[in-house]
Image (tube, helix red, strand yellow):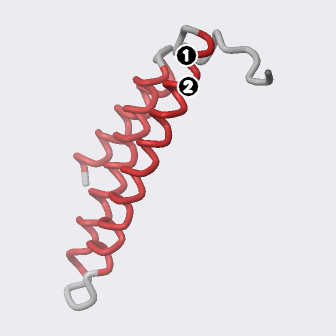
Amino acid sequence: MIVSAVLFCVGLYMIVTKQNAIQVLIGIELMLNAAILNLVAFGRYDRFANGGQMFALFAIVLAAATTAVALAIILNVYKKYKTIDPGQIDQLKD
């Protein structure tokens, strides 16, 4: 559980300090992996239903789909604005 807390804090630090959209996405993924690690760790106490492992598997599938959509959005923003710095993109309306 300490490992997941460290992973979550590193992910939060990356989200707060980075100016690159891909690095922010990596921070979000680290935070999600910390939550998945907690699900598996606490699933140890549910020996019969395996609820933690089932939720973790579901969360992994959702994380993969979310990452694919986020990378597609980042690529489209880069095509339009030639930057992936979220602070420099001031209008999304066209």
User: Quick one: SS at disc 2?
Assistant: helix
Q: Residue at x 20, y 86 (%)?
A: 47
Residue 8 in the image: above or below residue 17: below
Q: Residue at x 42, y 24 (%)?
A: 22
Residue 76 is labelled as: 2
Residue 93 in the image: above or below residue 55: above
Position of the N terminus, as image quadrant, is: bottom left
Q: Amino acid at mark 1?
A: Lys
Question: Mark 2 and 1 residues: CB-CB less than 8 Å, in contact?
Answer: yes
Q: Residue 50, image x and y in percent?
A: 25, 82
User: Quick one: SS at disc 1?
Assistant: helix
Pick the residue in front: 46 or 70.
Answer: 70
Query: Label 1: few (<14), some or many (≥20) within 10 Å?
Result: few
Q: Report how far apart the C-alphas of labels 2 and 1 lie in the structure.
A: 5 Å
Q: Amino acid at mark 2?
A: Asn
In the image: residue 4, left or right of residue 65: left
In the image: residue 91, left or right of residue 83: right
How many numbered badges does the structure rendering display? 2
Residue 79 is labelled as: 1
Position of the C terminus, as image quadrant, is: top right
Q: Residue 58, image x and y in percent?
A: 36, 67
